[in-house]
Amino acid sequence: MSRFKSSTMDGDLQEVFGTPVPELYEAAAGPDASPALARALELRSFLALTEEQVARVRDRVHADMDPDRDMGELSADKLRFDAEWLEAALDARDAYRAALGELLRTMPPPDQRARPVRTTQLRATATLPPSAAPAPQRAGAARARQP
């Protein structure tokens, strides 16, 4: 649903990935899709939906405040509710924009494929002098007490 609605971050996505948003969705469905692209598009979908909610509340308030509208139809309770709804939608929009912006800033360049990292396990070996080595314990043997 929000896949085909625009968002305020579509230009940023296109700039970072070098591809228009509809093509990014096609690429994300492929077997070689990067996790960063999938996350970016998920955040973008949430953002587009939230921006649609902001626009709906804004348009509803504008319609309620239309100068040609009967003043007897105005309701302070309805406007208060719309203001709370708008505040929640704007907070969500700001959070999604921040999260998507942070992801786009911190992800590796799109042309850099994730490569498996090879690690080698280093082993440290040391020999202790005979006097420093602990004496082996035998099962069931009682230690002699020293005076």
Image (tube, grey):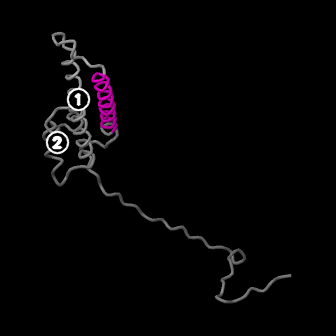
On the picture, is 22 further left or further right than 82?
Answer: left
Q: Nearer the viewer, residue 108 or 37?
A: 37
Query: Residue 15 is drawn in which quadrant?
Result: top left
Up-down: is 18 above or below 65? Answer: below
Residue 25 drawn at (x, y percent): 16, 43
Q: Nearer the viewer, residue 80 or 12?
A: 80
Q: Residue at x 69, y 89 (%)?
A: 141
Tell me the kind of residue under disc 2: Leu
Dominant secondary-structure state across the stretch colored magenta: helix
Q: Which residue is mark 1?
A: 8
- Furthest residue in direction front, as rendered: 72
Query: Residue 57 is drawn in which quadrant?
Result: top left
Q: Earlier in the sequence, mark 1 or mark 2?
A: 1
Report the span colored magenta.
77-102
Q: Residue at x 31, y 43 (%)?
A: 108
Q: Could you tell me which secondary element the residue under label 2 belongs to?
A: helix
Mark 1 packing: few (<14 Cα in 10 Å), some, or many (20+)? few
Q: Could you tell me which secondary element the residue under label 1 belongs to?
A: loop
Q: Which mark is residue 24?
A: 2
On the picture, is 76 further left or further right than 1?
Answer: right
Q: In front: mark 1 or mark 2?
A: 1
Quadrant of the frame with the N terminus: top left
- Furthest residue in direction right, as rendered: 147
User: What is the C-alpha distance between the residues marked 1 and 2?
Assistant: 16 Å
Tell me the kind of residue under disc 1: Thr
Residue 2 drawn at (x, y percent): 17, 38
Quadrant of the frame with the C terminus: bottom right
Residue 49 drawn at (x, y percent): 21, 36
On the picture, is 100 further left or further right than 22?
Answer: right
Residue 44 drawn at (x, y percent): 23, 38
Q: Is residue 141 magenta?
A: no
